[in-house]
Amino acid sequence: MSQIRSVISGVGSYLPERIVTNDELSKTVDTSDEWIRNRSGIHERRIAADGQYTSDLGTQAAKNALEDAGLSADDLDLIIVATTTPDFTFPSTATIIQENLGMRQGAAFDIQAVCSGFIYAVHIADAMLKAGPYKRVLVIGAETFSRILDWTDRTTCVLFGDGAGAMILSREENAENGIINNFIRSDGRYCNLLQVDGGPSRTQTVGHVRMEGKQVFKHAVKDIALAMKSCAAEVDLEPSAIDWFVPHQANQRILDGVARQLGLKPEQVISTVAKHANTSAASVPLAFDAAVKDGRIKRNDLIMLEAFGGGFTWGATLLRY
Ligand code: UT7
């Protein structure tokens, strides 16, 4: 029987123009460039302009990915958007992006797994491509986290940024490349440690991000390392076999801790946390695209993606680019 693989046809990303440095933040909240750099590795973040929405960032990233793949919106049959900061409660941000791209066929929907959203969305896309009848899926992680931050809470507002990343997955038979394995997990016991304190059903408000940072940190390092080991072990690989580690960009110290546990060299870790901060579901495809565009990630490289976020949710994807 022939092997069906979801192959990456193109990647793209988009960052809003406005850069906000740590020094700029320290003028409005009791923090410092030194504290933010030392504790998180973040130097600056991008913030969306007034009137610029999650769908706008996602649309731009999608256009860049389509260009990279040499495809048009007519070639897509599905859009999956991972976001926690949708334009509206409904319709989905995916259908708005479908309209922005002028796509008149197929289907589009959002998924919600907070910072792990892109990993979850890739898993769903891979399964739908393998099950058929879909042939080409546009997977987007897009966020305007700046809109759900409490800008007076120094424990959270310095950590996040806005942006979007996109990946086009195509169904191919007997391909050498593509998604090799997916691993996702969640554990609702910890839903209060990283959450938004509002929502349509409970409060009829949007709410703000609240986080017990230290506890999230401990779980993140442990669960990410286990997810990566499991994702590799299920296909009889050791994590040390991978060429590149493309992690969720929450904290440089988490990236370093996970890399150490897995025996990866610092130069194998794609880190964009200094410039992007934590862009939630957008952070993995943003980092992936940055490393493809700067020439580090090349075709045929073996790559592990991972993410961890609210829920808790976490997961990993092993792929050959
Ligand atoms: O994407 C979802 C996953 N998210 C994460 O993985 C985030 C995980 N957590 C973290 O990255 C880290 O826990 C943080 C960066 C959030 C915090 O670093 P930490 O080393 O755990 O610091 P802490 O929370 O223990 O705070 C240390 C001190 C506290 O003061 P006291 O109690 O020691 O007097 C905080 O009040 O730093 C203080 N603090 C700040 N000081 C200056 C907290 N935030 C700030 C700030 N500026 N922005």
Image (cartoon, rainbow, N blue to C red):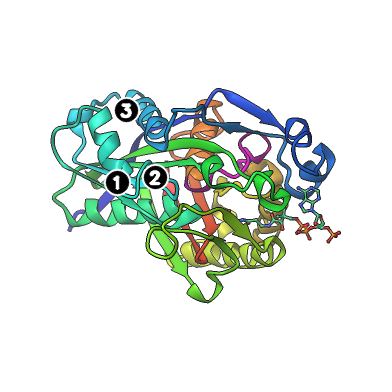
**In the rendered structure, which segment of residues is drawn in magenta?**
270-281
Place of residue 8 in the rendered image (x, y in percent of width and height, measured from the top left): 35, 39
**Mark 2 to mark 1: distance in Å?**
7 Å
Label 1 sits on residue: 92
Q: Is residue 179 left or right of residue 260?
A: left
Between 131 and 115, the one nearer to me in the picture: 115
* Circles 3, 1 touching at the beta carbon (< 8 Å): no
Place of residue 218 in the rendered image (x, y in percent of width and height, measured from the top left): 68, 66
Mark 2 / mark 3, whichever is N-terminal: 3
Of the 4 image quadrants, the one containing the C terminus is top left
Q: Is residue 279 magenta?
A: yes
Is residue 49 visible in this depiction of the protein? yes
At label 3, counting other C-alpha atoms closer than 10 Å, the crowd grade (few under 14, some 14-19, many 20 or more) is many
Is residue 317 visible in this depiction of the protein? no
Secondary structure type for disc 1: loop
Of the 4 image quadrants, the one containing the N terminus is bottom left
**Mark 3 to mark 1: distance in Å?**
21 Å
Name the amino acid, label 1: Ser
Secondary structure type for disc 2: loop
Label 2 sits on residue: 86
Between 181 and 118, the one nearer to me in the picture: 118
Place of residue 191 in the rendered image (x, y in percent of width and height, measured from the top left): 53, 69
Q: Is residue 203 magenta?
A: no
For ligand 1, the image quadrant comes to bottom right
